[in-house]
Image (cartoon, rainbow, N blue to C red):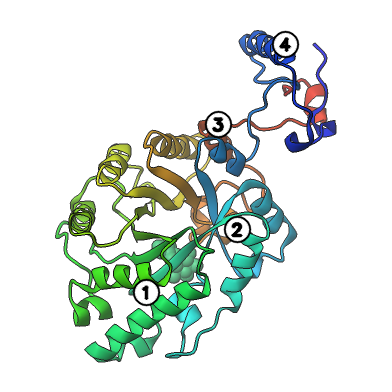
Amino acid sequence: MMATPTSIEPPPERRPRRSRTRTALALGMAGLLASAGVTALTGTAEAASTLGAAAAEKGRYFGAAVAANHLGEAPYASTLNTEFNSVTPENEMKWDATERTRGSFTFGSADQIVNHAQSRGMKVRGHTLVWHSQLPSWVAGLGTADLRSAMNNHITQVMQRYKGKIHSWDVVNEAFQDGNSGARRSSPFQDKLGNGFIEEAFRTARAADPAAKLCYNDYNTDGVNAKSNAVYNLVRDFKSRGVPIDCVGFQSHFNSASPVPSDYQANLQRFAALGVDVQITELDIEGSGTAQANNYGNVVRACLAVSRCTGITVWGVTDKYSWRASGTPLLFDGNYAKKPAYGAVLSALGGSQRRLYGDVQQGRGVE
Ligand code: 9MR
């Protein structure tokens, strides 16, 4: 069977519409080829060949955390631009980046990422407004009344800067303790403003940018446990009292000590049943090869099985710049080559990798 090399095809948007007869013939042929182990043929409806496009066909986004200072690296930018349709600034929107000195806001690096994304039609997740970490020391030094007004001002200024440009905001990040207590974590906000600080932050956030989805985001909440129960109770309480909250972010940082929980999907589902979207916000899974690929595939399938799981963000583009690079937890290796995990994610999303003409000549399969 001759196959036209994909590389000479125009992109889908410039291809003429096919007649119904041709499509039917092509589909019939695709069936025959599928039974011969060939996944697709030029001339059939093509599976999406990038993470973003495949996720979009499932009504989801597929994003990556990005760092402004890597955008000038050609393979970094081209991998980002080709594969992802959402970005999260990895550090650039945090308090220490945006308001290092009280009342003096700096948005240069965050602007760079937002502009990069907007000019390419990518969504932006805002990360993060109220968090105990990466917090300039002046915040911890404030008294209660000043801290309240500083928190609300910070939320308002940062959100208004990007009003209308942010799909979802991590309004409050990591407010609960690890372990079995289900208690709040000590932070300047918790210690001085008390339990009500989360509600106050969300109310302020809703007023600052009513179009943005407002998320609570945390780690070690990926399965059913004391910490996720505490978050669940918070969200249930907010929904019952009309406190604005639209989504819960599950960071999903996994490794052998903290594997993908067997009740991951069930946990996502129970939150969704409260009437919020769920998002996988910082996914990375340490490991390599088939084991890593299988874990990634399972995470993606869990999200797709939950209708309110609206998107997945991996916490970086390449292993090279991961916050835990030695664990090689991402989808592209340090040379931007696609790892087995990439293939598992793409295939779980219903996509398929495009083969080049050289692959056809060498019998590696065709499209
Ligand atoms: O990936 C981020 C890394 O570059 C920073 O040094 C670190 C500082 O705390 O934050 C990392 O991102 C964290 C995210 O903002 C919140 N969840 C945990 C992430 C990994 O530590």
Asked if residue 359 can be seen in this view, the reply is yes
Task: Please rate how many residues cluster around mark 1, counting C-alpha atoms within 10 Å: few if below 14, some from 14 to 19, many from 20.
Answer: few
Please give the label number shown on residue 320.
Answer: 2
Q: Nearer the viewer, mark 1 or mark 2?
A: 1
Of the numbered discs 2 and 4, the one sitting upstream in the chain is: 4
Asked if residue 286 can be seen in this view, the reply is no
Which residue is disc 1 drawn over? 133
Residue type pointed to by label 4 = Thr
Q: Is the CB–ligand 1 distance for label 1 below 8 Å?
A: yes
Q: Is residue 274 above or below residue 49?
A: below
Of the numbered discs 2 and 3, the one sitting upstream in the chain is: 2
Q: Secondary structure at mark 2?
A: helix
Residue type pointed to by label 2 = Lys
Kindly indicate the quadrant of the structure image that contains residue 202. bottom left
Q: Is the CB–ligand 1 distance for label 2 below 8 Å?
A: no
Q: Nearer the viewer, mark 2 or mark 4?
A: 4
Q: Secondary structure at mark 3?
A: helix
Kindly indicate the quadrant of the structure image that contains residue 183. bottom left
Which residue is disc 4 drawn over? 21
Q: Is residue 263 above or below residue 200?
A: above
Of the numbered discs 3 and 4, the one sitting upstream in the chain is: 4
**What is the C-alpha distance between the residues marked 3 and 1?**
36 Å
Residue type pointed to by label 3 = Ser
Which residue is disc 3 drawn over? 347
Q: Position of residue 6 (x, y in %)?
A: 79, 29
